[in-house]
Amino acid sequence: MGLKLIIFLHIIAATIWTGGHLILSLVYLPKALKLNDFSIIESFESKYERIGIPSLIILIITGIYITTVYAPRLVDFNDHYTKHITIKLGLLLCTIALAIHARFFLIPKKKLKPLAYHIIIVTILSVFFVFVGFSARSGGLL
């Protein structure tokens, strides 16, 4: 597969991941909080995970490939791509930490309000992922 196709797959997966989190944060979460109904979040997640998790996996795989092309050593922090990829790796680690915490500590106990904070933070991180990717490809906003 060519690099342009890999980047295209990365963008499509980012669209699905970020779009799903925006829908969750802006549509489902307010309703769940208003009604204090955890099942609204569970219902969304059970449907979204079928496409959201594969999208995240595609993002990680294509992101690793793109990293090997644009910043194979990840040591020159003055390099445009290395700086952006390092930021994205930090965002990924934060996202994974929040997901693990939510999956093992909040969701089993159906703690809606703490989960709401996680959802909002992951949504913000997702949008920032898109921004950093755009910055890398557009010549640098960061």
Image: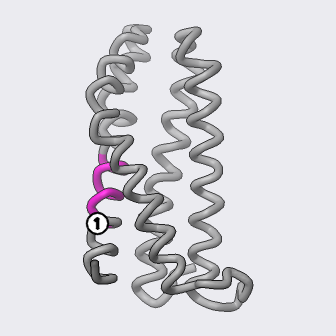
Quadrant position of residue 37: top left
Report the residue that reaches farthest toward the front.
1
Q: Quadrant of the C terminus?
A: bottom right
Q: Is residue 37 magenta?
A: no
Residue drawn at point x = 28 percent, y = 66 percent: 9
Q: Is residue 18 magenta?
A: yes
Residue drawn at point x = 33 percent, y = 19 percent: 31
Residue drawn at point x = 59 percent, y = 57 percent: 91
| Residue 139 location (% of width, % of height) | 46, 90
Residue drawn at point x = 33 percent, y = 82 percent: 3
Q: Is residue 135 above or below residue 118?
A: below
Neighbourhood count class around disc 1 (C-alpha, 10 Å): few under 14, some 14–19, many 20 upward: some
| Residue 96 location (% of width, % of height) | 59, 44
| Residue 52 location (% of width, % of height) | 34, 42
Disc 1 on helix, strand or loop? helix
Q: Is residue 14 above or below residue 116?
A: below
| Residue 95 location (% of width, % of height) | 57, 46
Mark 1, residue position: 9
Colour convention: one colour
Left or right of residue 131: residue 20: left
Quadrant position of residue 133: bottom left
User: Which span is picked out in magenta?
Assistant: 11-19
Left or right of residue 25: residue 64: right
Q: From the viewer's side, name the closer residue of 105 and 30.
A: 105
Q: Quadrant of the N terminus?
A: bottom left
Quadrant position of residue 27: top left
